[in-house]
Amino acid sequence: MASVILSRALGFISQKDWASALSTLEDARELPKLFGALSQEQVVTAISLIGHSTEQMIHDPVFSVIQDSTISFPAIAASDKTKASQGQTPPRKGRAGATERKNSKETSVPAFAEALRQAQELLLEAHASTLSTANSTMVHRISALLQNTVILLSATSTTQSRVLAGSGFATFSVDLARNVTWKREQSTLQHKETAKPGDIDSAHNSRRSSLGLTAEMAQFQNNYIDMVPHNWSVISVSLSDNHHDLCITKFRAGHSPFILRLPLERANSRDADSDIFNFENGKDEMMEIIRLANETSHSASRDFSVKGAKAAWWAEREALDDRLKDLLSTIETTWLGGFKGIFSQHERRSDLLARFQKSFQQILDSNLPSRKQGPSKKSAKTSKVALDPRVLDLFIGLGDPSDPDSDYDEALNDLLYFVVDILQFHGERNAYDEIDFDAMVVETYDALRGYYDAAKTGSDRAEGAHTVLVLDKALHAFPWESMPCMEGLAISRVPSLACLRQLITESQPSASDDNSEDAPEGHYVSAEQGTYILNPSKDLVNTQSTFQPIMKGLGSWTGIVNRAPEEAEFEEALSSSEILLYFGHGSGAQYIRARTIRRLEKCRPATFLMGCSSASLTEAGEFESYGPVWNYMMAGCPAVVGTLWDVTDRDIDRFAGRSFEEWGLFPKGTFKENKRVKGKSRASSEDESESEEDGQVMNNVSLAEAVGRSREACKFRYLNAAAVVLYGIPVYIKHRGEE
């Protein structure tokens, strides 16, 4: 009977009849339920409450814009939240909330905020019960709903105390769900093998799931964030259930998580004439480009002896290259907008940020009607809202405004609307049409220029800065690393924070000498212990002729050239080498089975898989994505360089040669042909400066940095270069004498 009532409620939900859904669910509360049905009922009830709350907000004069507004959590400074939630007695909190709400004498929170609070409580209960029993789809869905609910609550609650109870958990709920999925898969692999001494007892693990994972939640910051090197940032990007929003969470050691909810169509809500570019538009275009890239990268079906055939092929590839460039630019300007600064690796200067904060407060004071009022009772009751410093850091992350290639008007406009929304939602009311946003953009531009003039470092990245991306399964196909705001930066991907923790704890530090404390943090590999697999299919003649003469100089390495490796040879390379270079078709999966890789006790080498689609993942609907790179990560591989789609061999060879030089595996100038880039003109002075570096061996450059720098070696900067991504953590080379 309960399942029938739930089905009826789901029918009302599909019609957005929230009141009927909630009324129907009331009938199911007292009925007996099968195992797992309670959590399903809680989730359906929470969805109904959230929908009902959203419907109520549409009719609210202040919160009617919230669905199209960017929200951050936290948004206001910690001291303000403390005053709101702890520094006042309950009666005074109620009066404060009442005075902030126009035309209202109620001391209670708005009805829609109360509905969100109830939804939060239900989702917290459901999450605790499903972590150890429900399928991964349900765990992910509950986590995403919980995160979104807390973000909305943080903006709509008149007192922060109503949010704080579950907010700490919700900031990492999505990433905890990824951890659960990852650990389940690892546990499955372990249980198929004979238990090892270090394995966790499965019976004990299942008994402690709810209690143990609850403890893990409480220690999440310590276990997964504070152990990350201080100059790394971990950025988790997830997509909402309805594909309406991107949620970006930034984790840094010693800091609480910072979440942004970005409505993808927010620009259209402010300007009805702007084109709609939603997630479906972006994903469809990306998949079409990948399909055409895969088709055109293989010449077997083309007859280049026909006059004009080669020129037509080049034109087709160049058009695709431009098309991908335009797509990435559109994603950055439309989806990220002014919030692209969250990916910035600029060096943080607290003194200059404080100065910018003072300037920005003056801009708000001189432009907002709420702050330009003369002395009156009304203005005396309105206290200024202090922004969280990370909100201001988003402005700094845009970079030096004097950069000739920069166009900051739209980005600053996006951020200024965001700030005004924060003030609006926290009690400082302003009519949008009474604010001169154009004047605020100009003044903010000047304040930013003052910041960078004082910093005198432009947009230079902080020393040793690294960004780790943790992406939703729907977002893996996009080459985020090649968007303009991340171009050339040191960036890697990991499947989950649990995977990242494993890679960091198992990493091999630098040599233990007097200079080791100054060495960048990451994993270190020996340049003397490696394996290369070159042209195993015997049809990549150009690739073999490019690399074989040079690889022969690696006397201590194992080389497999012009023949297919035995699975045992491949397995030995993954078990004992510190660097593995694979130049063949695909990921090499035709030579070694996925389960062989996944069951390795330890996959040791930093690995180059220089074949087509070697880092692509196959989407499986509600199930988790899968692919070769997942197998390497599951086996603890410190880093894998691969491609998201099919690429042409000559261009990927150029990239590989340049990355080997940038990383320090070979001296600069070893692969001279990589410098002759056709179709993309390069200044002769740049060529001369590079030639002066010939023979130099790069030191303390991470593989992620090398990959970021080497994309420019490709003729097709987007169609081929953007396909290359790195999974894992920063890996550095130890040269002879450093070991």
Image (tube, rainbow, N blue to C red):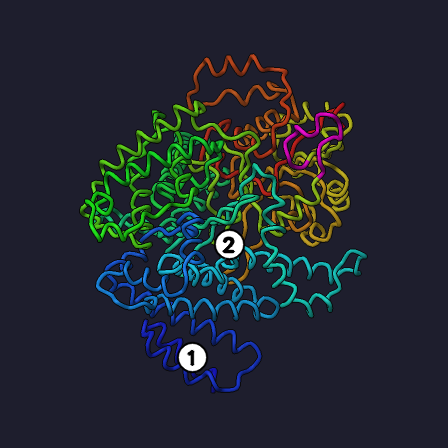
Residue 32 placement (x, y as % from top left): 52, 86
Q: Residue 473: which numbered mark, if any?
A: 2
**Left or right: 240 as drawn, with respect to 648:** left
**Left or right: 20 as drawn, with respect to 736:** left
Q: What is the three-letter code of the residue carrying label 2?
A: Lys
Query: Which of pointers 2 and 1 lies earlier in the amino acid sequence?
Result: 1
How packed mark 1 is, by other alpha carbons closer than 10 Å (few <14, some 14-19, many 20 or more), is some
Who's the residue at 44% across and 35% down the image? 718
State which quadrant residue 191 falls in. Answer: bottom right
Q: What is the three-letter code of the residue carrying label 1?
A: Ser
Residue receiving disc 1: 7
Who's the residue at 52% across and 70% down the image? 126
Region in magenta: 508-523
Q: Is residue 37 above or below residue 146?
A: below
Who's the residue at 43% across and 16% down the image? 683
Question: From mark 2 to mark 1, how far is it between C-alphas?
Answer: 28 Å
Q: Is residue 316 magenta?
A: no
